[in-house]
Image (tube, grey):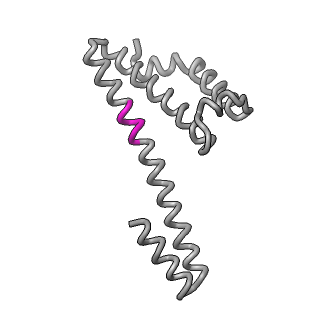
């Protein structure tokens, strides 16, 4: 489907208006990027749901199940951020590079999680 849209926009650039063809091609790539981001979000949601179901099956209390699922969500989001920092390398190589952005992201995540743990305990009734 996307190949057909790219072929049509290329044909439009050659036979029609060049600028509108460029706009059509760029909008196709923007849609592909959005769909890829949605796919990553769906995979993270599936991971959290699997962890949620496994913790219920293991017999954890409701508060523990919520805490485990929330922790999985936070860790998954941190890994998504780390993998989005570089599209050509693995998150391990990005993490080992010790770039300032990576260190700032991890430091802020740890700082915010320790500062608002009491608020999260109150909101989500963690045990």
Q: Is residue 18 left or right of residue 119?
A: right
The quarter in which the C terminus is drawn is top left
Q: Which x, y percent locates residue 105?
A: 65, 31
Q: Which x, y percent locates residue 109?
A: 60, 26
The quarter in which the N terminus is drawn is bottom left
Q: 36 above or below 127?
A: below
By secondary structure, the bulk of the magenta-drawn segment is best described as helix
Number of numbered discs present? 0
- Is 54 a magenta residue? no
Q: Is residue 101 left or right of residue 18?
A: right
Q: Magenta residues?
A: 42-47
Residue closest to the eye, 35 or 91: 91
- Is 44 a magenta residue? yes
Q: Residue at x 53, y 70 (%)?
A: 25
Q: Which x, y percent locates residue 71?
A: 46, 23
Q: Residue at x 25, y 17 (%)?
A: 57
Q: Which x, y percent locates residue 75?
A: 50, 27
Q: Is residue 82 left or right of residue 123?
A: right
Q: Residue at x 58, y 36 (%)?
A: 90
Residue farthest bottom in this picture: 15
Residue closest to the eye, 103 or 66: 103
Q: Residue at x 67, y 27 (%)?
A: 96
């Amino acid at each position: 489907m996307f190949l057909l849209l790219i072929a049509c926009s290329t044909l439009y650039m050659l036979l029609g208006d060049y600028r509108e063809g460029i706009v059509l091609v760029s909008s196709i790539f923007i849609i592909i990027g959005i769909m890829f981001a949605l796919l990553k979000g769906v995979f993270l949601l599936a991971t959290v749901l699997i962890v949620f179901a496994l913790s219920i099956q293991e017999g954890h209390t409701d508060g523990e199940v919520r805490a485990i699922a929330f922790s999985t969500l936070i860790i998954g989001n941190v890994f998504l951020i780390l993998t989005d920092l570089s599209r050509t390398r693995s998150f391990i190589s990005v993490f080992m590079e010790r770039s300032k952005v990576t260190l700032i992201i991890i430091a802020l995540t740890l700082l915010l999680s320790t500062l608002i743990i009491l608020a999260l305990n109150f909101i989500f009734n963690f045990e």
